[in-house]
Image: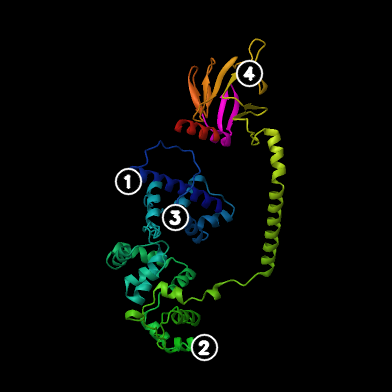
């Protein structure tokens, strides 16, 4: 009989699944019609099908042994036609199940049953900011004090704080979303937010009654908190009251503390008066004797080195002059001027001398080839003359230009020479030095001759 009941339940499941398919195709129109087949396909059942099949099994088992079973126990097996009759008698035909919704419909139903996401974007305002704003406004009743004294998650202007407060009061959508988000905050986060709530005027007035000269302990603030529970905020502790009282004492906000008013009239102290009142001796650093001794020793050493260098200066000057040939010449009574180069010195002892390159056929007064390479210098490059008024002139008689103090003197032209003039001839440089004493005597004699 058990095998018969199992086969009957299977046939019943097949009938119910077929009935489901027909109802879905006829009622909803979402599932297309398919050709029926006698072959049994094992598939997953819906929840309602599982419930119905289990009910059918339990009802068939609860009926107990029937007449057919007694006949089977006696030894005679029923035929197949009898089995069908017994199945029809023992198993009641279940009511056709309601059409199961399609998978897309079930997904929509599941989505709609989910709770509303209160973590929706609420703008820059976070749930912690809303909770802090609500508690602080209820304590102080002053939005400007909230703007100045409360530190939110980001910086808000006074206008933004006002708009948010009015939205929490009068906008039902924002108010509902904000309340739902606040309910989801962790208790520790809520406690941290409540500790940041500003003190009200009534709380500060009670704290100011404690004298500034006293040394209150935590028990003092605990007694004050227990005596006035209706005034203090619910999250206040004795420690927080003590910290705020110390701040009030620091800024002279207690009742027994008085702030001295500023002097009036001419007694106002300006910066210059305060600077005059300062004692400069108190501002100076203490003397460092070790440092002063080291500075004195270093100063003496430097002065001694300078003195030694001054004494040795003439020795070094002789060496420099011997190398460069730039020493000042010792003029005698016959030398009018000196044309000094790097290697040699040419003395001018007549009123007119010639410059150039000496050869076998050409003899000149100043042979420039003794100074250096002179293959570009003409055989007669120039003439230096002294006039009666004491002025020296150089005339260019060569094929290339001369340079006097960097200024070119073209062939056929002349230029005045002065003391320390630099004469450059084809890359060779000379310094023209004048015997000022002898030239002064020449000028004086010339002036006497003119007067006479």
Q: Residue 209, relative to residue 402: is it above or below? A: below
Depth check, mark 1 against mark 2: the one in front is 2
Q: Is mark 1 on a helix, strand or loop?
A: helix
Q: Which of marks 1 and 2 is nearer the N terminus?
A: 1
Please give left or right for residue 126 compared with residue 296 in the image: left
Q: How crowded is mark 4: few (under 14 residues within 10 Å), some or many (20 or more)?
A: some
| Alpha carbon distance from label 2 to label 4 | 105 Å
Q: Give the range drawn in magenta.
A: 417-440
The mark closer to the camera, 3 or 1, is 1
Q: Camera-side residue: 410 or 53?
A: 410
Q: To which quarter of the image does residue 123 belong? A: bottom left
Q: How far apart are marks 3 and 2 (CA)?
A: 80 Å
Q: Can residue 218 be spotted in the picture? A: yes
Q: In this view, does 199 lie above or below 307?
A: below
Residue 374's mark?
Answer: 4
Q: Position of residue 364 (x, y in %)?
A: 62, 17
Rate crowding at label 3 as few (under 14), some (14 to 19) or many (20 or more) other CA atoms within 10 Å. some
Q: Name the residue under label 1.
A: 27
Number of the label disc, if any, that sits on residue 215: 2
**Marker disc for residue 52:** 3
**Picture coordinates of residue 221 (x, y %)?**
48, 86
Element assignment for label 4: loop
Q: Is residue 355 left or right of residue 160?
A: right
């Amino acid at each position: 009989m058990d095998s018969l009941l199992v086969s009957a339940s299977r046939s019943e499941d097949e009938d119910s699944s077929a009935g489901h398919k027909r109802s879905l195709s006829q009622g909803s129109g979402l599932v297309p019609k398919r050709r029926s087949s006698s072959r049994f396909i094992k598939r997953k059942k819906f929840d309602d099908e599982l419930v119905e099949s289990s009910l059918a099994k339990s009802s068939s088992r609860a009926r107990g042994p029937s007449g057919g079973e007694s006949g089977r126990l006696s030894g005679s097996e029923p035929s197949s036609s009898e089995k069908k009759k017994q199945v029809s008698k023992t198993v009641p035909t279940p009511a056709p199940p309601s059409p199961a919704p399609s998978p897309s419909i079930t997904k929509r139903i599941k989505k709609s049953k989910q709770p509303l996401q209160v973590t929706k974007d609420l703008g820059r305002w976070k749930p912690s900011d809303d909770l802090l704003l609500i508690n602080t406004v209820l304590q102080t009743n002053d939005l400007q004090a909230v703007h100045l004294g409360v530190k939110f998650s980001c910086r808000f202007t006074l206008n933004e704080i006002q708009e948010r407060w009015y939205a929490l009061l009068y906008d039902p959508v924002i108010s509902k979303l904000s309340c739902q988000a606040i309910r989801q905050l962790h208790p520790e986060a809520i406690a941290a937010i409540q500790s940041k709530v500003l003190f009200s005027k009534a709380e500060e007035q009670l704290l100011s009654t404690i004298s500034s000269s006293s040394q209150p302990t935590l028990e003092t603030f605990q007694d004050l908190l227990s005596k006035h529970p209706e005034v203090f905020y619910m999250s206040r502790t004795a420690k927080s009251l003590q910290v705020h009282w110390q701040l009030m004492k620091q800024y002279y906000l207690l009742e027994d503390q008085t702030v001295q008013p500023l002097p009036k009239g001419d007694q106002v102290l300006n910066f210059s008066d305060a600077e005059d009142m300062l004692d400069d001796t108190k501002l100076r650093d203490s003397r460092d004797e070790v440092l002063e001794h080291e500075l004195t020793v270093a100063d003496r050493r430097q002065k001694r080195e300078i003195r030694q260098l001054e004494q040795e200066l003439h020795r070094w000057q002789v060496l420099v002059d011997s190398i460069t040939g730039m020493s000042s010449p010792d003029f005698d009574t016959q030398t009018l001027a000196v044309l000094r180069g790097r290697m040699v010195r040419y003395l001018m002892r007549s009123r007119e001398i010639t410059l150039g390159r000496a050869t076998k056929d050409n003899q000149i007064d100043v042979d420039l080839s003794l100074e250096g390479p002179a293959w570009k210098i003409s055989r007669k490059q120039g003439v230096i003359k002294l006039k009666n008024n004491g002025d020296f002139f150089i005339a260019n008689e060569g094929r290339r230009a001369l340079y006097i103090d960097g200024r070119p003197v073209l062939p056929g032209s002349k230029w005045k020479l002065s003391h320390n003039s630099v004469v450059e001839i084809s890359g060779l440089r000379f310094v023209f030095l004048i015997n000022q004493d002898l030239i002064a005597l020449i000028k004086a004699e010339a002036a006497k001759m003119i007067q006479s």
